[in-house]
Amino acid sequence: MSEQDCPICLNPMAKPDLAHPVPCPCSFNFCVTCLSSLLASSKDDYQMASDGNRHVKVHLNCPNCRHDISRVIEGTIEERRIANAKLLKDVPDCELSSGELQQKYWTKGDELILQSEKNKKQTNMMQPALEIDTTLFGGLEFAMTEQEQKYVTKLMTSGYADQLCQAAQILEGTAELVRKGISPSLSKKQNDGSIPPSINREAAATARTTSMLAGGYSNTAGIGPSRSRDGNDVTTNFQRQMAQKARDKIRRPLPARMPLSVTLSTGEFEKLALATRQQAGLVPDAENKSWWRGIFGDAGERLKGGTLTFVDDEWDGSIADAFARARIGPQKGHRKAEVHKKLVTSNPAEKMSIDRILKVGEEEVQNIDAQQQPREDMPVVRSQRVLVAGVRGQAGKSGIMKGDVVTHVNGEPFTGNADDLNSLLVSAYEEQGRDGVVMIVVNADECTAEALRLRSRIR
């Protein structure tokens, strides 16, 4: 991804996007399409002023630093619309699409959200209203504003793999902010005027309180174990929330492979590069038989790439595959890892819920509502895919697991085989050295995207 690509949708930014950046202290900039989507997603959160103008009622935050951009977002979009109209002024109408024609004849005072974008939203008006689903955030909901939760829920349940990848990248950025101790700036002040505590203090206080209440004790002097009137332990809010999540997991189970975006150091693939050089005969015999190999063994044979190893697999095209995790056999010597079988949950109630989700998809295919048009841009089924066969080191700590499907590398969809992926990672190490980075997204595939969309239909 170059500096002129949008960091959210990864598409190249137009000249007006670069000429009129978002006025944010961190200098984070993204394209007018993503900026308009952010504004459109909050259209239900406007308030009408006495002069008839609508103002943003909620705070729209920068995805990078959480700075409030709600007061400047409309002005930035307006500047870009005007600049884009000037660029298209001399282009013949016959060479422009309907959307570009709307951009060409856009003038100051027109609505910021183009009619083509409105029509796109109207095609989905028959779908159920979007509800925030906190089970999709991997435990990061406490660090996200309400608008961010709505946006990520929308991406996760869209049914499109590229939007699933975008959601995974947003969650990775949120996790990084949590590690840095940056709290969500829903508002600088709460409703009562007090300053909200930071994430670390709030999380620590919650953990302490939960620990004490779960054990039946209080930190207040003179108060012993907490009991109800009938003598039973008091059920805490935390316990109720965990019980509700457990019930929801059975009623609406998540796919076995959830999308995840991780950024790894290229140094993690140094052993993979060494093994590749050994196989190509580029490592001298003296170096290949160094004294330390007698102690630790052959790195090329024992590690087979070190941090990550991969295996080729085929997708059968079924949505049920999203609820199964591949069982991969061990990799010994020169024998490559193999996918033995797919494992599904053994819980009967959870199996029934999965069948219920799949049945929703079958009914959609058989009985398409006359008022709903079928999706014209359905992705082509990609049978070839690459699974993670082994994981250790930084990749293992970041959450990647055996059986995950590698779908994107450095923001681009990956469609090759395991050897192609190894070559890509080795090239990244050779080009950037140990101090570079590689962004890998797993499980942002058509199968998982459709499973999450169908799951959102279950109420």
Image: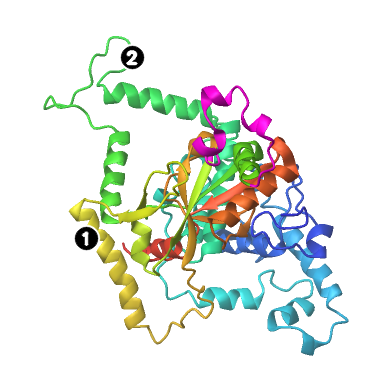
Task: Residue 174: say if magenta.
Answer: no
> Closest to the observer: 453 or 219?
453
* Residue at (84, 59) in percent of width and height: 19
Q: Is residue 58 visible?
A: no
Question: Which residue lies most toward the left here?
Answer: 230
> Closest to the observer: 86 or 399?
399
Of the residues shown, which amino acid type is indicated by label 2? Answer: Thr
Question: Which residue lies most toward the top here?
Answer: 222
* Residue at (26, 65) in percent of width and height: 356
The quarter in which the N terminus is drawn is bottom right
Quadrant in the rendering for residue 268: top right
Q: Is residue 43 above or below residue 291?
A: below
Q: Is residue 247 visible?
A: yes
Of the residues shown, which amino acid type is indicated by label 1? Answer: Met
Quadrant in the rendering for residue 236: top left
On screen, residue 82 versus residue 98, left or right, reads right
Residue density around tag 1, few if under 14, some if 14–19, many if 20 or more, within 10 Å: some
> Closest to the observer: 126 or 110?
126
Tell which tag, 2 or 1, sits nearer the viewer.
1
Q: Position of residue 148 (x, y in %)?
A: 54, 51
On residue 352, which mark appears? 1
Question: Which residue lies most toward the bottom here?
Answer: 94
On residue 220, which mark appears? 2
Q: Do tag 2 and tag 1 residues touch (Cβ < 8 Å)?
A: no
Cα distance in 3D space between marks 2 and 1: 46 Å
Q: Which residues are magenta?
A: 280-307
Determine the secondary structure under disc 2.
Answer: loop
Determine the secondary structure under disc 1.
Answer: helix
* Residue at (52, 38) in percent of width and height: 301
Q: Position of residue 271 (x, y in %)?
A: 60, 37
